[in-house]
Image (spheres, coloured by chain):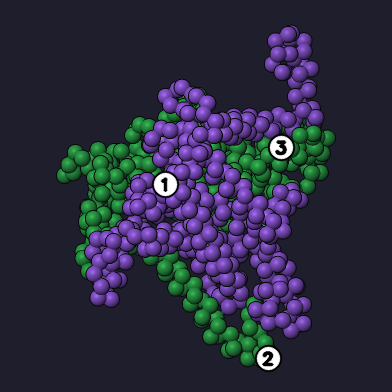
Chain colours: A green, B purple
Amino acid sequence: MAKNTDAPKSLASARKVPTILATGVFVIICGLIAFPLVAGLIGSFRPGSEIVSQGLSIDLSKPLILDNYRALFAKFFPAGMDDASIVGSNNYFMWYKNSLVLTITTVVLTLLVCYFVAYGLTMYKFKLQGFLFFMVIATMSVPFEILMLPLYQEVTTLGLINTNAGVFLPGLCAASTIFFFRQYMMSLPKELLDAARVDGCTEYGIAVKIMMPVTKPAFASMAILCAMGSWNNMLWPMMVFRDTSKFTLQIGLNTLLTPYGNNYALLISGSMFGIIPILIVYLIFNQYLVDGMTSGAVKG
Amino acid sequence: MYSRVLLIGGITVNKVKKMLYSQKVAPYVFVVPFVLSLIIFWAYPLVSGIVMSTQDVSFGSRTFVGAQQYSKLLSDPFFKTAVFNSIEYMLLTLLLLIPIPLLLAVLMESRLTKAKGFWKVIMYMPALTSVVISGLLFRLMFSEGDNGQMNVILHWLGQPSFAWLKTKFTGWCALLLLCMWRWTGVNMLYFVAGLKSIDNSVYESAEIDGANGIKKFWYITLPLIKPTTVYVITISVFAGLSMFLESFMLWNGNSSPKNIGLTIVGYLYKRGIEKNDMGYACAVGVVLMVIALIINFIQLFATGTLSFKKKED
């Protein structure tokens, strides 16, 4: 969509101004997008209660202090910290650990289950295939919030309230993940399967030993998306978990924000520290993430 | 079924094993988890939600009340506010989060923009933050305190501090900015992926025919990117209609001044979880589902696409 109506020799100079303009648009937009995060980062070096009562802005006129982070890590460096800070810090890292455990469990189980379901739906021809695939799409078109309350009652009846299983079981067969695996597998040659069968491989052996290695990129994409979703998930875990000791990081941070929380130092530094794991994963695997995310949009 | 056979005698074990490993039975074994999950965690709650919406549910006892919950809903001013807010939010996010990301994607993919990868990485970053953290950041920037970013800007202009989140217009500006902040980059990446799938030769032949930039965008890009646009609209409609946590975080809880931040899901949560009135809350859920279905049909009809058929090929 470049304005390349000019003669070839003047092309470079003719494009100079539009290039600066186009790139400038992104400089401004990315500046605006980075702004809240930078403000949050700077704010995390300011007294927490002041930030919560007075607001957050990029203001470098006052000195930066480390108090919030000392409160955050009070558990590891208790010297000179009061008991409340140490309790807060203990809670924070307990939630952090809960979130990590829940995220890893969710990612591993969801990916395995969805892979096998997608494998069954894609690699064979059988009677219910069309119907089941229609149901995969159908489950995608009902927002989770509609099922939330009956599901909450069901999970309570099953005795899964306050457990990790209560959080991840309902979403184990994630339709979008099945859909993505299916899209990926459809582009793979089915001759692979027949060759393996001739070699005496069982149906399940093929799924695990032959196809799984070939599907690695799809696993990578889905792992990141699933990890992000699980790490940042809030509404459903908030309903399932009752005890403070079971809370995930997001629920825990939210309780710090309530009037009873009253530990604003921890809230500010903890929020910033809570982005780190997902940011690391993102910066390493960002290409896989984009592929996974957009697959439904292009082929859909 | 197979386990029952197993119990009958050890002789049949081999037979069963053979059957389980046959190419005819294997696909059914693979899809068992999905079928179970579909029944237990989808069909059952869906039906049970509809059933509960016709009941009065309180502390374990259920009595059938027919359509009473629905007639109560019709005369409930809070519910009206919630529906109105949700639909308004959805329409505004559609207006903001479809055209702008599309234009940005076109600009991003043009030969003019330098350092594309870097901008993409930055623009996706807000989507990494949870609603809790992003809600907190926006709440504090739109704080009524003197050090809130928006008030600092007001002070530059010689104005006194303002309680941004207490009036509908400014509160919604914060809400919509939060939403744009989080999703502009994501939607742009969807469109970028859509643009990449368009064959370059189409543009080349249009250039030979003398089409300019705007014409190429209108007659080539827009029609060819339609599957992506339909997809982004669909997810935006659902996300907009079921928005809750953004408002929950921005107004620190489920009660905003004059209910300016009350949404359908917020009301459902309030009735079901905070007030433990499951029957009424389920009726709210059913209404939400009906609205979602109607809008989806309108949208599928308007765009002339049936996404089911599209997705199956």
Mark 3: secondary structure:
helix
The residue wearing badge 2 is A7
Using the numbered discs, state the Cα–Cα distance from disc 2 to disc 3 in whole angstroms: 57 Å
Q: Which amino acid does label 1 sit on?
A: Phe
Going from the N terminus, do you reach mark 2 or mark 3 first? 2
- Which quadrant of the figure contains the C terminus of chain A? bottom right
Using the numbered discs, state the Cα–Cα distance from disc 2 to disc 1 in whole angstroms: 64 Å
* Badges 2 and 1, same chain: no
Q: Where residue A132 is drawn, which disc sits there?
A: 3
Q: Mark 1 lies on which chain?
A: B
Q: Where residue B78 is drawn, which disc sits there?
A: 1
User: What residue lies at 35% left-to-right and 41% top-to-bottom?
Assistant: A252
Mark 2: secondary structure:
loop
* Badges 2 and 3, same chain: yes
Left or right: A168 as drawn, with respect to B130: right
**Foreground residue among B84 and A127:** B84
Question: To which quarter of the image does residue B32 belong?
Answer: top right
Q: Is residue A171 visible?
A: yes
* Dots 2, 1 in contact, CB < 8 A: no
Q: Which amino acid does label 3 sit on?
A: Leu
Give coordinates of residue B202: x percent, y percent: 75, 72
* Mark 2 crowd level (few <14, some 14–19, many ≥20, 10 Å Cα): few
Mark 1: secondary structure:
helix
Left or right: B114 as drawn, with respect to B195: left
Labels 2, 1: front one: 1
Left or right: B208 as drawn, with respect to A241: right
Give coordinates of residue B142: x percent, y percent: 32, 61
**Foreground residue among B160 and A168:** B160
Q: Which chain carries label 3?
A: A
User: What residue lies at 42% left-to-right and 46% top-to-bottom?
Assistant: B78
